[in-house]
Amino acid sequence: MKIWLKRIALAIIVILAVATIGFIWWGNTPLEAMPEAITALESDNDVLVINKKWMVFNPINASTKTGVIIYPGGHVDPRAYAPLAKEIARNGYLVILPPMPLNLAVFDINLADEIMAANPEIETWYLGGHSLGGAMAAEYVAANPSKVEGLFLWASYSAENTDLSGIPDLKVLSIYGTEDGGAAEIAHSWQRLPDDTVWVEMEGGNHAQFGSYGIQPGDGVATISREEEQAWILRETIAFIEK
């Protein structure tokens, strides 16, 4: 009997080890960023890009006291969000796009603390993200409401047990596409957000086009181009910050 128990225990250990290795491999092989996203990591006359620990986009021709942190979507190469990050910076804001452990923001929800501490010159912070990144940004804001001016949810929503509706003076933007497979869940999340949340529904937009990568099941089929959708996202996000 003891021999069988040892064999069963060994089998369980092997299964867990294989599952762990498989998960780590999966986490480290995210959906790849498109070539145009890689190109966006190059500095130009308006934006200085520093790609080291984090991807930092700094406006060259403007002095800013406002910072924007973007948590990337789950299982997506964070570089896929470089085009939007760079264009936000071009509008005069410091933008920081950090990689996440195993490409899942759930493993470092409080990374915003480290980013803020490393940039003491910034007085006002906006935090948000795409999909899982937005949901984890909402978790951070729920626990640290005094540290941010606003939360932007790109095709995202807070968890059912994360209620932001009672946080005084919190600015929230929720923007999503009508063709997103999760559009209904996003729209239903209004109960957990402040009454003055800015809602933007993009006709023809889907889930994947918030970044520059491939598609995953449930992303939906867009009827507008990636360029159109990202221009819409940029316009509404800038308007939200400036408001």
Image (cartoon, rainbow, N blue to C red):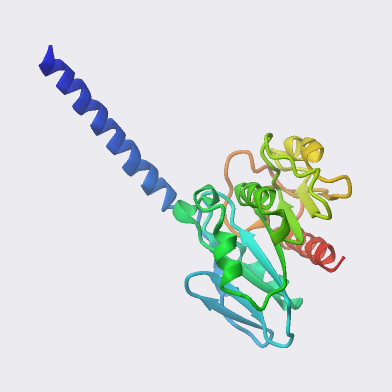
Q: Decide if residue 127 is on the left or right side of residue 238.
A: left
Q: Decide if residue 99 is on the left or right side of residue 218.
A: left
Relative to the observer, which residue lies in front, 172 or 169? 169
The residue lying furthest to the left in this view is 3
Q: Report the number of numbered marks.
A: 0
Relative to the observer, which residue lies in front, 66 or 237? 66
One can see residue 85 in this view: yes
Q: Decide if residue 10 is on the left or right side of residue 187.
A: left
Q: Residue at x 34, y 40 (%)?
A: 20
Relative to the observer, which residue lies in front, 127 or 11? 127
Q: Quadrant of the C terminus?
A: bottom right
Relative to the observer, which residue lies in front, 215 or 165? 165
Q: Residue at x 49, y 53 (%)?
A: 103
One can see residue 34 in this view: no
Q: Decide if residue 208 is on the left or right side of residue 106.
A: right
User: How far across and how far down the image is residue 195, in percent?
Assistant: 88, 45
User: How far across and how far down the image is residue 235, in percent?
Assistant: 81, 65
User: How far across and how far down the image is residue 140, in percent?
Assistant: 63, 51
- Res 193 → quadrant: top right
Q: Residue at x 77, y 38 (%)?
A: 189
Q: From the viewer's perspective, is residue 213 above or below residue 184?
A: below
Q: Residue at x 44, y 52 (%)?
A: 102
User: How far across and how far down the image is residue 124, in percent?
Assistant: 74, 69
Q: Quadrant of the N terminus?
A: top left
Q: From the viewer's perspective, is residue 179 above or below residue 171?
A: above
